[in-house]
């Protein structure tokens, strides 16, 4: 069980993003072939590819957080003295975590509303709540990854100080 958790902790985003990317490419490719060769198309492929892209974007935000690859103002921060850099790191990460948690909370409420209204998609006839769920799931995962990044920074800071 512990190995499985560690594997998911380490590789979840990568597996999800790569597998859905391949699936999305296959969907879009077959849609193009169907339109250009057979003069026919199915709307569900377009819709599914669109919904997969939404999920990919939110999971990719978590992936970027995990690897500290989000856009930031390194140029400005690097001009500051070391203590100021450290302070700015913690201020920005605490604000970012606060925003991610707020987004998780508000988007979960919105998703709950969408589920309760039983709104369905046009082509695939699935509940739209499953599409909206990408936002709270992605924000919660990003919050989790932010806590991991911040804990890692604290851990290495403690090791360096000793």
Image (tube, grey):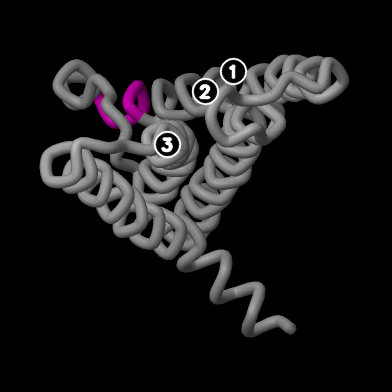
Position of residue 14 relative to residue 61, above or below, is below
Main SS of the magenta part reads helix
**Numbered-mark total:** 3
The residue singled out by tag 3 in the image is 61
Which of the two discs, 3 and 2, labels the residue nearer the N terminus? 3
Q: Residues within 10 Å of mark 3 (few under 14, many from 20)?
A: some
Outermost residue, right direction? 116
Q: Residues within 10 Å of mark 2 (few under 14, many from 20)?
A: some
Q: Which mark is residue 17?
A: none
Q: Which of pointers 3 and 2 indicates the residue nearer the eye?
A: 3
Q: Which mark is residue 96?
A: 2
Left or right side of 108 for 27: left
Q: Which mark is residue 99?
A: 1
Marks 3/2: CA–CA distance: 12 Å
The residue located at (28%, 55%) in the rendering is 26
**Depth order, front residue of 35/104:** 35
Q: Secondary structure at mark 2?
A: helix
Left or right side of 86 for 97: right
Position of residue 97 relative to residue 35, above or below, is above
Range of residues picked out in magenta: 81-85
Percent position of residue 100, x then y = 59, 25
The residue located at (87%, 20%) in the rendering is 116
Percent position of residue 46, x then y = 37, 34
Mark 3 touching mark 2, by CB under 8 A? no
């Amino acid at each position: 069980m512990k190995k499985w958790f560690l594997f998911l902790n380490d590789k979840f985003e990568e597996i999800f993003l790569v597998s859905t990317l391949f699936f999305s490419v296959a969907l879009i490719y077959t849609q193009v072939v169907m339109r250009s060769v057979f003069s026919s198309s199915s709307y569900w492929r377009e819709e599914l590819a669109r919904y997969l892209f939404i999920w990919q974007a939110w999971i990719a935000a978590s992936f970027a957080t995990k690897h500290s690859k989000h856009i930031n103002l390194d140029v400005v921060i690097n001009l500051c003295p070391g203590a100021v850099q450290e302070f700015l790191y913690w201020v920005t990460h605490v604000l970012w975590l606060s925003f991610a948690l707020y987004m998780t909370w508000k988007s979960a409420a919105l998703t709950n509303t969408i589920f309760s209204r039983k709104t369905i998609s046009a082509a695939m006839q699935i509940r739209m709540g499953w599409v909206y769920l990408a936002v709270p799931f992605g924000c919660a995962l990003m919050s989790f990854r932010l806590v991991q990044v911040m804990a890692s920074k604290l851990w290495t800071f403690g090791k360096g100080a000793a």
